[in-house]
Amino acid sequence: MKEGYELIYKRPGTLIDRRMSYCPGCFHSTIHKFMMEIVEEMDIQDKTVGVCPVGCSVFAYHYLDVDMQEAAHGRAAAVATGIKRILPDRVVFSYQGDGDLAAIGTAETLHACNRGENFTFIFINNGIYGMTGGQMAPTTLQGQKTSTSPYGRDVETAGMPLKMAEIVSTFEKVAYVERVSCNTPANARKAKRAIRKAFEYQMEGLGTTFIEVASNCPSNWKLTPEESLKWLEEQVFPYYPLDVFKDVKKLKKEE
Amino acid sequence: MAQKGYVEIAIEVCKGCNLCVINCPTDCLAINTSDTNSYGLHYAYLAEPEECIGCANCAVMCPDAAITVYREKKQKAAHPKEGRQ
Amino acid sequence: MAELKLMKGNEALAEAAIRAGMQAYFGYPITPQSEVIEYLARQEPKHNYVLIQAESELAAVNMLYGSGGAGARVMTTTSSPGFTLMQEGISYMACAEIPCVLVNVNRGGPGLGTIQPGQGDYLQAVKGGGHGDYHLIVLGPNSVQEMVDHIFLAFELADKYLTPVMLLSDGATGQMMEKVMMPQPIEYKPDKPWATTGKTPDRERNILTSLFIQPEDMEKRNLKLQAKYKEILANEIRYEEYKTEDAEYIIVAYGLCSRIVKNVVLQGRKDGLKLGLFRPISLWPYPWDRLGAIASEDRVKFFMSVEMNAGQMVEDVKLAVCGKKPVHFFGRMGGIVPTPEETYEAIKEKIKE
């Protein structure tokens, strides 16, 4: 370090010193980074347990230096339920993509939210199935081209894209729901703050916390990382707005 | 006068995604088009060190946590309104 | 303390699980075993265990994965259609080496089937209903007492070998009421350094996974599992023999059918027929060697497997006997329990041939 300077920002020690296999520009890496920064800042490495999904982030346990369980496709919410019920004082999170949470795992997701299971969902929604080569997801936009909707998502047969943050915010025992993104430094900082808030609410035992990240997939969207941010801003945000959909602490204030 | 800063970008970790470059408020980062790391990727680097203000936008945006940011230590302000961080 | 009680099979199973130190139960109602979760729900205020009626068997088995992986003694019970739903989770737990106890109260099938007892899930249980090279330790209780004893044993074996252990019961054994000596509750203190309880500075992070994307790593895990199964094969075979010392006709049956066959053996002996009952108690690992040794006896004329299915355990009998003697089969399907009389007739028919 140069004389007269101080360290402002560095890679967290809780992120394993290993090159992440995500594509250049992918928000999976960004969110992994923020989550581990939070674990380091809150000093909760010895009480954090994560559940990783099937999808691009199936190898999340290679990068996050916390105890982790690999769940079957879609089942992370059930697995996290099992962990949190047995270890209620740990900070438990499930980390899932759009197929995992909103297609095959919808039942487990909704019922965990309905029961108010006190763990944090980190939902990486990039509107496509990345790992398996770019197939349509339940959150693929109307008209969006994917390998299984080569002429664009046809809502007549496939239905409308699912708005999971909005849906789970209707559950009584869900404490905090926010949709965030990392397309600008300001939004990225807000995303980190949202995740930290979710962990804090969990530690206060307030109920289910749900952070949906409107994320990108440059590789399967066939865009550069820079173009993928534009896609988010122009195409995704109008349908999936960034907002806080529920916050029990704010509700109480209004009452 | 704006504070000064500087960044170190880990060449082998950087994937050349360009998100740091386009989000730098002083345009002091660039992609090195004449060199690649061992993965064959053109990495980002601090092209205009004098322009860096140590805002850490680049490090926040960097998906791979490849960037370390340093900033000038602030002198103690003579007047409460001066040198506010 | 240990006490003598008159209990229904399913409820005795539940009570035994509590006394064996079960810390979490996740399940879904399905006939003929819903009494288990109902009993546990009634007892819950007196104990400390986690109890969730999950949204499906699929969710239940994955909750088992999570809490078993977090180091707890966990159990689920279900019946045939529900057990099929659980196969995914079971394959994952077998590979990730997560201990748990599963109970399948076998009913008639296939498909939605009937609520009457059946033994049509035998092959699914012992040859692996889920995908991949794995085995479950499978126990076949034939009385309420054995259900209770096997629960204690199952939790021990699961923790010892880090594998799911299964009780293959059936609708009748689950519903019948018998007197049972309920053992004293044990004080279970988990000691599982591999569990995901939070990475403390003194160790590396614990990862429980069944994903080994490099083929060499996948083979390594498989070799580890196979070595474990070899150890189980060497140490955990259990069976019971009734009047086989001089028997000429060996009837092989497990679970409910073994009780019917015992009846038949007694009747046959009265009529001068040298019948004997061979009852496997561990269905995996199966007592192939012992059965094979009996087959080598000159006095033994044939084997007959009696089951409530189209002929499933008979395959293991044939494997064990290895062509040394004829192997016959008698069974009823559809949830029908064979009567001692018709079973006896079937045996006598084969003797005549």
Image: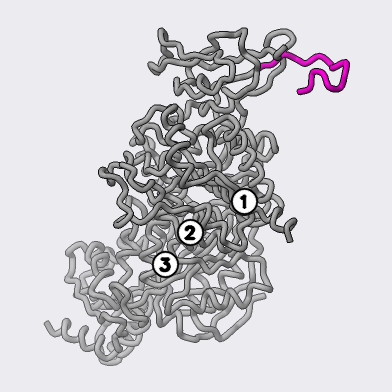
* Residue displayed at 62% across by 37% down: A190
What secondary structure is marked by label 2?
Answer: helix
- Same chain assignment for discs 2 and 1: no
- Which is the main secondary structure of the residues drawn in magenta? loop
Q: Secondary structure at mark 3?
A: strand
Q: Nearer the viewer, residue C224 or C245?
A: C224
Amino acid type, mark 3: Leu
Would you name the residue on which mark 2 appears?
A108
* Position above or below: B13 against C308: above
Residue C139 has which mark? 3
Give the total of numbered labels. 3
Q: How many angstroms separate mark 2 from mark 3 (CA)? A: 30 Å
Extreme left residue here?
C353
Q: Earlier in the sequence, mark 1 or mark 3?
A: 3
Q: How far across and down, in percent of the image, does residue A239 sit?
A: 46, 47
Q: Nearer the viewer, residue C332 or A199?
A: A199
Q: Quadrant of the C terminus of chain A?
A: bottom right
Labels 2 and 3 share a subunit: no
The magenta region covers B70-85
The answer for which chain carries disc 2 is: A
Q: Is residue A56 visible?
A: yes
Q: Is residue C271 left or right of residue C141?
A: left
- Residue matched to label 1: C191
